[in-house]
Image (cartoon, grey):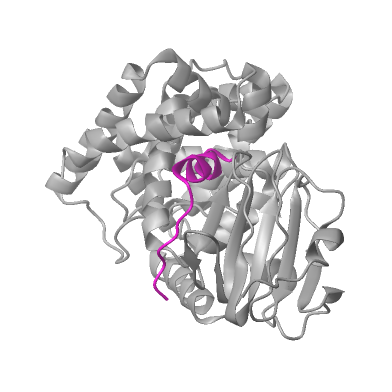
Amino acid sequence: MADLLQRIAERADPAAFRELYEAYGPRVKAYMMRQGADAGTAEDLAQETLLTVWRKAALYAGDRGSMTTWVFAIARNLRIDRLRREVPWQQLPEGRLTEASSEPLPDEAMAEKERQERVQAALAELPPEQKDVVILAYLEGLSHSEIAERLGLPLGTVKSRMRIAYQKIRQTLESLE
Amino acid sequence: MTITRHLDDSTLMSFAAGSLPEALAVVAAAHLSVCPRCRDEVATMEMLGGALLGGLPGAAMRCPLPAAPEIERHASPGSPAVAPPGTARGAGRRAARGAALGEVPDPLARLIGNDLDGLRWRWVAPGSWLRHVPIGNGRLHLFKCSRDVMLPEHGHEGSEITMVLRGTISDSTDLYRVGDVCDIDDSIEHAPVAGTDGCICVVAQDRPPRFRSLIVRLARPWHGM
């Protein structure tokens, strides 16, 4: 997937954009609908997310990071701006390495792929009560206090579940380093 | 600046998820602008967001491809797709350096400017001044205290994040310096005290604190030191 971004950044390749759109458009639309957008608005925001990827591809192309993470961050900021009508204070990821370079080194690209796979696997293994708070925060856009109200839990319990969930994910990544 | 007191993982996670109430997000962004350690955590947490997005069952698109004349325009031979990578990256680095140099971290400077001394402060008690910062969701204030003045003791219905912008504050267990944050929830009641050079801090809450009036509490100066 990362090389789609490369093709967009370097050659403005419409075929690469089509692939990207087909892979991520429906997911970003689903994300926006989970956050309360109606189908039409969600589709508009999904399109705008991917057009932003198109326009900003060069900002990210030298990075070894994950394409999916980049799309997520753009969709998140667009949601804050359009659905919540607030300022997105989150910056888009700039990548770990700052020099502009074309091809990720093979071992770095591999390491990044493995990091992603580890995160996926750790997420799948979370106990339901931890996974639930993570999903409510990320996919429903609820604050800690709103999650506490939704689940009828003390605020401290919500925060500690999120902390524990994250520690597990971080541990699986640390074992890579 | 050596930062020793960081944001809670659950706060960083909520920030990365885009679900931190805006007042808290401003202070989180201010801390992140000076704290590489917390930035690294957010990068990993954004990866988790990517994993969740990637795992969502897609919703069918009505329109198979966006009506996007700019795609075709940019794709025409000879026209650059986007700005050369160097320019945008350079601008980002310059912005990051500028943020590191100023006393007011960049995200906060967007709301109050760069000059803490030039702000209009509201006197609330001997040695204590307050400045309200309008924000969409939650409550955001700056406070300024003279040496050894005790900040109002209070509890919370929700979350509170305080960041030191100038001077130091301490509570029963910790000393907070410039860039440090105190990130607590409703289980904690605390009463920090300004250090020997006084302090200026920014504080965000998602719910009103549990007392009738901040002024009432500020009006009780610290006598114990």
Let me know if residue A141 is in the magenta part.
no
Q: Toward the viewer: B134 or B195?
A: B195
Q: Toward the viewer: B151 or B94?
A: B151
Residue A113 visible to an observer of this rendering: no
Q: Is residue A22 left or right of residue B132?
A: left
Query: Can you say which quadrant of the picture contains the N terminus of chain A?
Result: top left
Q: Is residue A33 left or right of residue B179?
A: right
Q: Quadrant of residue A15?
A: top left
Q: Quadrant of residue A14?
A: top left
Residue B86 visible to an observer of this rendering: yes
Above or below for B58 versus B14: above
Q: Toward the viewer: B13 or A84?
A: B13
- Residue at screen point 59% across, 25% down: A29
Residue B179 placed where, x, y %? 50, 69
Let me know if residue B15 is in the magenta part.
yes
- Residue at screen point 36% across, 20% down: A126
Residue A93 placed where, x, y %? 44, 52
Q: Residue furthest left?
A: A107
Above or below for A143 versus A81: above
Q: Toward the viewer: A1 or B121?
A: B121
Count of residue discs: 0
Residue B113 placed where, x, y %? 71, 76
Residue B36 placed where, x, y %? 38, 62
The stretch of residues the image draws in magenta is B1-18
Query: Can you say which quadrant of the picture contains the C terminus of chain A?
Result: top left
